[in-house]
């Protein structure tokens, strides 16, 4: 499997500062033109879409009332997943600080804080860059 991941890059381009597990992770996470990179990207897109679906469903008052605990559990699961993905990107990046300050790095970080940045109101709607809190009009960005 390691050879498949490292050998199916068409031009053989690899950051020279990476080796071992960091190179393997870099190839999977940042190289969208490898088989492993494509699988990673598809799984990540599905996770993002499902996360947005959960946020939309949670914003429906009747569903929120009936499934509040389930929505909280699922949203925290996505937050943990997105935080792990962000930390993995930092760990395998040739220049972690540069990635963290880049546009995509800031977007990735903002996904990690969706469930952490709750409104402090009674309706417990989530604040994020996608959804503003309906009861107190707060937003993260």
Image: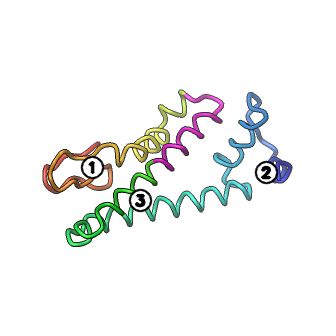
User: In this orientation, which residue lies closer to the viewer: 32 or 22?
Assistant: 22
Closer to the chain start, of discs 2 and 3, is 2
In the displayed structure, does residue 133 sit left or right of residue 29?
left
User: In this orientation, which residue lies closer to the viewer: 77 or 139?
Assistant: 77
When asked about the image quadrant of residue 23, the answer is top right
Q: From which residue to which does the magenta span run?
A: 80-96
In the displayed structure, does residue 82 sit left or right of residue 136?
right
Label 2: which residue?
5
The residue that appears at 27% across and 49% down in the rendered structure is: 127
Numbered disc 3: secondary structure: helix
Q: Is residue 19 above or below residue 114?
A: above
User: In this orientation, which residue lies closer to the viewer: 8 or 87?
Assistant: 87
Closer to the chain start, of discs 3 and 1, is 3
Label 3: which residue?
74
Q: Assess whether residue 85 is covered by the magenta stretch.
A: yes
Q: Position of residue 62 (x, y in %)?
A: 21, 72
Circle 3 or circle 1, nearest the eye: 3
Closer to the chain start, of discs 1 and 2, is 2
Q: Position of residue 32 (x, y in %)?
A: 66, 53
């Amino acid at each position: 499997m390691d050879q498949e991941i490292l050998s199916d890059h068409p031009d053989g381009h690899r950051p020279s500062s990476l080796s071992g597990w960091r190179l393997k992770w870099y190839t999977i996470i940042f190289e969208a033109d490898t088989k492993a990179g494509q699988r990673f990207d598809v799984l990540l897109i599905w996770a993002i879409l499902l996360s947005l679906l959960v946020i939309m469903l949670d914003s429906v008052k009747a569903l929120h009332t009936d499934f509040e605990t389930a929505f909280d559990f699922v949203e925290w699961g996505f937050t943990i997943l997105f935080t792990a993905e962000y930390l993995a990107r930092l760990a395998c990046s040739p220049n972690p600080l540069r990635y963290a300050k880049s546009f995509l790095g800031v977007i990735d970080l903002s996904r990690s804080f969706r469930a952490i940045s709750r409104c402090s109101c009674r309706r417990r709607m989530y604040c994020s860059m996608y959804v503003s809190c309906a009861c107190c009009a707060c937003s993260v960005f």
